[in-house]
Image: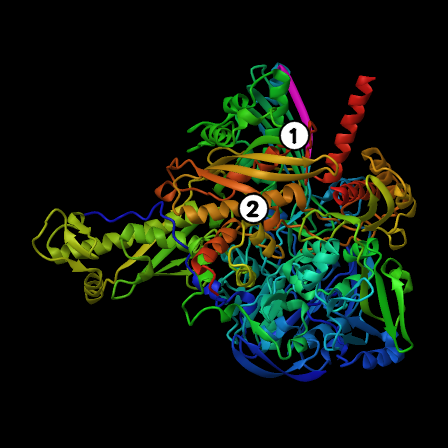
Amino acid sequence: MYYYRRLPQFDYLAPKSLNEACSFLKAHAAETRVMAGGTITLHRMKERIGVKKYVMSLKVIPNLDGIRASKDGKLSIGPMASIQSVADSRVVQKQAMLLAGACNIHSTPQIRTMGTIGGNVACNLATAEMVPVLSVLGSQAKLTSAAGSRTVLVADLYKEMKDGEILTELLVPVAKDTKAGYEKWAMRKRFDYATVSAAAALSMSGKKCTAARIALGGVTLPTRIPKRAQDMLKGQTVTDALIEQVAEAAAKEAHVGADVYFTADYKKELVKVMVRRAIKKALS
Amino acid sequence: MSRETLIGKSAPRIGSEEKALGLAKYTTDIVLPGMLYGKVLRSPHAHAKIVNIDTSKAEHIRGVKAVVTGIKDTPRGGVFGIIPHTRDHVLLPFDKVRYMGEEVAAVAAIDEDIAEEAIEAIRVEYEPLPFVLTWQDAMKEGAPLVHDNRAKNVAAHYLVNEGDIETALKKSDLVWEKTFTCEVASHALPEPFTALCSYEPSGKYNFWMQTQCPFQVRQGLRNTLKVELSDIRLHSVEMGGAHGGRSDTPPGAFVAGLLSRKAGKPVQIKMSREEVEDCMRDKAAKEWTMRIGLKKDGTILGRDIKMMLECGAYASSAIVELWVPLLIDEVLWRAPSYRYDARLVYTNKTISSMMRTRAHVGPMSMDVAFDEVAEKLGIDPIQIRLKNAVLPNEVVPSKATVTSTGLSESIVMAADKSGYKKKRGKMRYARGIGIGSGNMQSMFYMGFRSGSTAFIKFNDDGSCTLFTGNCDLGQGNRTMHTQIVSEVTGIPASMIKVCYGDTELCYQDPGDYSMSATVVSANAVKRAAEDANRRILEIAGDLLDVAWDEVELRDDGKYWVKLRLGKGHGVSLGEVCRTAFKRGKPIHGFGDYRARIDYSDFSVDVKEPYNEKTYGMKVTAYSFGTTAVEVEVDTDTGGVKVTDIWAVNDCGTVLNPMLVIGNMHGQLNFMLGQGLYETNVWDAKTGRKLTSDFRAYKVPTANETPHIETYFLGIPDPAGPYGAKEGSLGFGCGLHGAISNAIYDAVGVRIYDVPIKPEQVLKLLKEKEARQTKKKK
Amino acid sequence: MKQEMTFMVNGDQYSVQVDTRRTLLEVLRETLGLTGTKEMCNKGDCGGCTVIMDGKPILSCLTLAIEAQGKDIVTIEGLANGFKLHPIQQAFVDKGAIQCGFCTPGFIMSAKALLDRNPKPTEDEIKEAIGNHICRCTGYVQIVESIQAAAKAMGGAK
C-alpha cells in the first residue's frame, strides 16, 4: 500500500500557441494529460489516478480566457476563464444569469479562482457542475485539434470529445424569454461538489411552456438529459401537478449509481426534488 | 492595596502571535542538519501473514541510507499497549498484518522522491487471510482471529453490577429498551502525523512528535526500543491539534527511531493525509443497548446497559473507551441499580483510540429515553430530568462521590435561554427544539502516571521558568498555567516562561489525556507557585524584619509590610531573588498533585472477563452541562440543519472565559460533525477505508456552523485550582440526544443512530406518511 | 525536469531552479524556507495551504511551482510589518481564534483576500469566503468574529 505526498514523475510542457498544443497532441494524445486550472488534474495525480507521461498546461496560450458577447447572439467564453471571472462578468450576468449565478455558488473562492470553466466542462465528471447549466442554455463547445475545429453541443461533449481535441470556446446562446433555474444538493452546501443537481430552462408564453430543457448533474453521463421529462412540458400550461409529474419522470429516466454515502434510490429521490425546485425557481 | 485577580479574565493564548505570524514551528516544520526522509511501506491487505520481505533492491538505490523491517530490526519482546491486559501491539510487526495500511517496512533516504522510489522497490510476499470489519462478524462462530490469543476477538470484557437490576426492573412501572449506535469517527487532525528522531551515538533517541502524553509515549518507546527512560527524550513541540487522536505511542515514532539509529542521521517521517486517516487512530464504532426501569413518576430505578465496541486491529488506548462510559455514565443520572456489560472487539480496521466527544451514545440514550418516557408517562420532559439529575455530594452506587455538579442548573438554564417551553411542540412543522445533557471526568486513574509534578526555576531578576510535563495542544494549557503562577505570585505573565512536555527537563504528568490538565496539572502548578511564593515571602520578610505572613505584594511590584503605609520601603522581587542566590538557596517552587482515586488495580491479567470492582472515587471531578438545539428539517430530502445551539457549561470557576468559550465551540463542532455529517465507510471486499480525506470525510465548515450561545454556571469545584474543572468536553456530550429530540419535535420521527443521515430521516418520514395515510383510510 | 523560474514572494524577488513536478507549496516551504504556509491535506480539501497570488486566494498545494513564474505571491509571512501584526493577525490573536494554530495561516490569507475586495462583508459573506477551510479546534465562531473585528479596524484600508 503506497501513500504518496509528492506528485509522480511527468514531463511538463506549456505550449505557447494553440497550434503548438494541437500538433503535440497529434503525436502524443494518448500519453498526455491536458491541464487547465489544475485543481482536478493535480488532485487526481496525487492519488496516482490518470497519471500520464506528459502534462500539458494550457495556461500560457493567449486568448483562451476572454468573455465577450459575439455578434450572432451568442456569448463567447474562453475555456481558460476562471469560474470566478465568469461569475463576476457583467456580460454573463446580463445575458446568461443562470450561468453567472451557478458559477457564483460553485464550491469555494479558491476553487473558483483556480478552476476554469473549460476544465469543469471537459473533465467528464458526473459532478461537473457547469455542464447541466450550459446544457439547458443550449450551449455549444468548439473543439480544436490538428485536423481543424468543429462545434458540438455541450450536452454531447461527453461522447463527442476525442483524444487530441482541445476545448477552445464555449458559445452560449442568449435567449431573451427563457426562464431558467438551477438547484443543487450536497451535504456541505458550499464545500462539497453537488451530489445531485438540476438545471431547467423554459421558454414561456404566458403560463404556457413553449419549449423546455432539463439537465441533471450527478447522474450517469448518458442520462444527463431526461428527454421524456423535458417533452412533458412542451405546449403545456405549467401547474404544480405537472411539475411534479415532470420531476418524477426525470428521476425515473436518470440513472444514478450508489456512492459511499447514498443509495441509488435516495439519489433518485434527490433528482426528483432538484428538478421540481429548479423548475419552480425558473418560474418564480 | 490588593492585586487585581486574573481569575475570570479573558486573555489571548500564549504563543498566538507566533502562530498568527506563521513563525511557530510545528513538528512538520522542523528541519535538522543532515536530516533524512523516511517513508513507510504499508500492508495492502486487511489481514495477512508476512511470508517474506525482500529489501535488497531498495537498499541499493542511490540515496537510500537505511531500510528496516520487523523481522530484522524490531527488538523482540517489546509490545505496546496502555494497560498490561491488552498489550498487543508490536509496532513494526514480524508475523502478520492486521489492518490495511499497517507498517511492514520503512526506508530513510536523502530526499522524499528517492524514499518513495525505494518503498516501491521493496517486495513483500503475503499470504492473505480472511478479515472481519464489524464486531458482529468478528464474534461469529469460526470468524478469523485478529489476535490468536483472544477467543471470539474479544480484547476485553468489562462487567459492572451495582445494586440489583433484575429486581429493580421487575419493580418498575415502565421498562424502556432501545439500541443506539454510533459509527467510527475520525479526528481529522490538521497537522499530519510526523515523527522526527535524531539518534545520538551515546544511545539516546531524541524525538519530536505530536503527542498528548509524552511520558506515556516515552514509556511505550522504552519498552519497544528496549532502552532506559533516560535514553528517550521527547522534545516540546507546537502541535496542530490532538483531540484524543494522539493519545498513545504511534508506530511511526518507533520506526523513525529504528531508521535513525540504523542510518546514523536524523530521520523525519511525515505522513500524507490518507496515510494519517488510514493508519493513525479513529474513534470506535459502538452499539449501546439500554434497558431502563422507571416508576410512573419518572424516577429511575435501574439501568441495564450492554455495549459493544470495535477497537480495530489493536487495543491501543481504546480500552479507555470501554470503561470511560462507566466512569461518567453512572454519574450523570441517578440509578440505584446499574449493570454495565461491555466488550471490546477486534476488527481488521484502523486502530481506535480516544476522542474528545466520547460520542458514546450513552448520554444520547438517556436524553432520548427521557423524552420518550416523559411522553408515555405524561410528565414534563424537564421535570423528569431534574428528578433524576445527580446532586452535589451525591454518592453513586459504585461509591464515587459527585463532588460538585450544576447539572440541574444547566438543564434549567438551557431550557430558559432557548425558550424551550415556549417552543416545544409549538413551532411550525419541520422546525423543532430538543435538549440533551452530558458530562466528562477530570482525571481518572492512570496507574503510576496519575499525578503531576511542576517545578519553577527563578532567575535573579525575578523572572522564572515553569517546568510542567503537561502539553499544550492549542487549547491553552500553557496560558492557564501561566495565569495561575501569575495569580499566586503576582509576577506578570510576561516574566513567566513555560517549558512544557519535555520528558528530559520536566517531571511526569498524565498528559492531556483524561482531561486532567485543569485539575491535576494545574493544581501541581498552583502548588509549585505557592511553594515558590512562600520562599519569596520568607526572604522578603527577612529583608523587612517581619514574619513571612506579614508581607504583601503591592501594585508597584514591590513587597511591603502589610498595613504599614507611608513608612519604610519595599523590596523588589529581584532583590529577593538575588538575596536568595547569595544565601545559597535560590528561589524555586516545587509542587505535586496526586488525584485521590480509590479505583484500584488495572494490572489484572486474566483470560476471563476483565472484571473490576469499582468502588470509591474514580475521578477527581466531573464537569456537566446541557445543550438545547433548534433544527430545521428539509422534509423533501431528509436533510437536517442545526440552526441554533444554547450551551450551558458547568465547568467550575472559569479561569479564562475567552479560551473556554473557544474550546466549547470546538467541541460543538466535533459533536455536530459526528451527529450529522461525518461517516466512515470501508469496502467490504478489500477492507479498504474509503473515506480517508477531508473531501470524503465530511467535517463541518464555517457554513455548517449554527448560531451558538454559551453560558457558564461558575459553581466552584472543591478540588480544582481556584475551583476550576474540565470545561471543553462534558457540556457538549448531550448534543446528539438534543438533535434527535429536536428532530422528533420537528417531524415526529425518532432516530437512535448517529450520524443522523438524510436518507434515514427521509425513509422514516415516508413510513410515517404511509402510516398516516393508512389510518385515514 | 528542472527549470529556472523567477517570482515575487512577499515583495522579494526569487530566482530558483525547480523540479517541474514540485508544487508551489513545496517550493515555498522547502526551497524558500517559508514554513508558515501549511501542508494539511495536500489535495486542496482543507484550505490550509492558501496563499494570495496576483491578489486572489489560491491553494498552493494544487498549483505547480513552475506556473507561479512571474507571479506575485503573498504568504502569511508577508503580512506583518516586522513583528507588528497586520490588523487581521491582531484580531485573530485578540479574539481567541487561534488554538492549535495550524489552520490559522490559511484562514488569515483568505480573510485578507476577502477584505481586499470587500471591506465590509456580512457574516454570510465571511463564512462563504472561508468555506474551503477546515478547523478542528475553534468551531469557526471566533474566527468569524476576528474577521469582523479586522474589517472594522481596517475600515477599508489594506
Please, is residue B376 above or below residue B574 in the view? Answer: above
Q: Quadrant of residue B368?
A: top right
Q: Quadrant of residue A69?
A: bottom right
Magenta-span inclusion, residue A127: no
> Could you tell me which secondary element the residue under label 1 belongs to?
helix
Tell which tag, 2 or 1, sits nearer the viewer. 1
**Residue visible at 49% across and 40% down in the picture:** B709
Between C85 and A178, the one lying in front of the other is A178
* Left/right of residue A10 with respect to residue C28 in the rendered view: right
Q: Residues within 10 Å of mark 2 (few under 14, many from 20)?
A: many
* Left/right of residue B71 with respect to residue B472 in the rendered view: right
**Residue visible at 62% across and 31% down in the picture:** B432
Span colored in magenta: B173-180
In 3D space, how far apart are the residues under numbered discs 2 and 1 (Cα atoms)?
Answer: 29 Å
- Residue type beneath disc 2: Arg
Magenta-span inclusion, residue B178: yes
- Residue type beneath disc 1: Ala
Please, is residue B219 above or below residue C16 in the view? Answer: above
Asked if marks 2 and 1 fall on the same chain, the answer is yes
Task: Please tell me whether the stretch drawn in magenta is mainly helix, strand or loop.
Answer: strand
> Could one spot residue B159 in this view of the protein?
no
**Residue visible at 79% across and 43% down in the picture:** A279
Between C69 and B762, the one lying in front of the other is C69
The disc at residue B356 is 2
Q: Residues within 10 Å of mark 1 (few under 14, many from 20)?
A: many
Dot 2 and dot 1 residues touching (CB under 8 Å): no
**Residue visible at 50% across and 24% down in the picture:** B386
Q: Which chain hosts label 2? A: B
Which residue is identified by label 1? B746
Query: Could you tell me which quadrant the N terminus of chain C lies in?
Result: bottom right
Residue A262 coordinates in the image, percent (x, y): 78, 45
